[in-house]
Image (tube, rainbow, N blue to C red):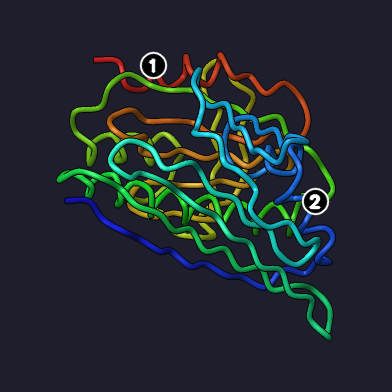
Amino acid sequence: MGHEFELPQEALVDVTPEEVWQAIATGPGIDSWFMGRTEVGRDGVVRTAFGGGALPDSTITAAEPPGRLAHTSAVGEGGRFVAYEFLVEGRDQGGALVRLVTSGFLPGDDWESEYEAMSHGLAMFFATLVEYLTHFRGRTATPVTAFGPPVRDWPRAWQVLHGELGLPSPPARGDQVKIAPAGLPPVEGVVYFANAQTVGVRTPDALLRFLQGFPGFMMASHHVFSGDPAEAAWGAWLERLYAD
């Protein structure tokens, strides 16, 4: 059966359109808010390596700096594809309006679970872009990707994570985080975004994100702006947290 979708998002940010363009149209910029490591090739292809694999290549179909960027994956099995279009508009009073429309097609009769995960994840990624432009603009992060063991009970998994972070369940924007995870530096920060399948924490030097990975792993997808990114340590922490 499958499902055609379109997910629009927008936000005002207190940066120039040119600064937004650097964040959405260059590899180091995208590395600082999206996921995994991204390269924007001279051949007009956006390539993202993630979790030991890769997302489908996405071909740039429009590049009009600093106002419009669009790229789309090739049509795959069952008609699957995902397209992204960024529109950036400078404001007379300063700052910029950033609009992202993600559209595409998910094949199969089980598209609903994938769509739910995608929509929750896209909300987190866009919120991270806004947080990056607001608090870390001009800086480049090292992306961190780590996975915990398979999760069988997601409500309990989130309850465990929220408790470990010292957060209510569910958490909300503005909640404070102050913990000393075993094997990792102490974390002090504030929740900048949370929904049913994600939570994001801003610290002075990082954007820490936890996501309900599709189909069944708790995932850390962080952006570290200074110091040791500690990717292996985050993976070990998730393994300990969810060990049976």
Relative side of 180 to 237, left or right: right
Vertical relation: 179 (above or below) 30:
above
Residue 218 picture location, percent across and down: 37, 30
- Mark before the other along the chain sequence, 1 or 2: 2
**Residue on which disc 1 sits:** 239
Relative side of 55 to 202, left or right: left
Which image quadrant: the C terminus? Answer: top left
Amino acid type at circle 1 is Glu
Secondary structure category for the residue under label 1 = helix
The residue drawn where x is 64% and y is 24% is: 185
Q: Which mark is residue 131?
A: none
Task: Tell which of 52 and 105 is nearer to you.
Answer: 105
Amino acid type at circle 2 is Gln
Task: Tell which of 160 and 73 is nearer to you.
Answer: 73
Relative side of 226 to 211, left or right: right
Residue 213 picture location, percent across and down: 37, 34
Residue 79 picture location, percent across and down: 33, 45
**Residue on which disc 2 sits:** 22
**Mark 1 burial class by Cα count in 10 Å: few <14, some 14-19, many 20+:** some
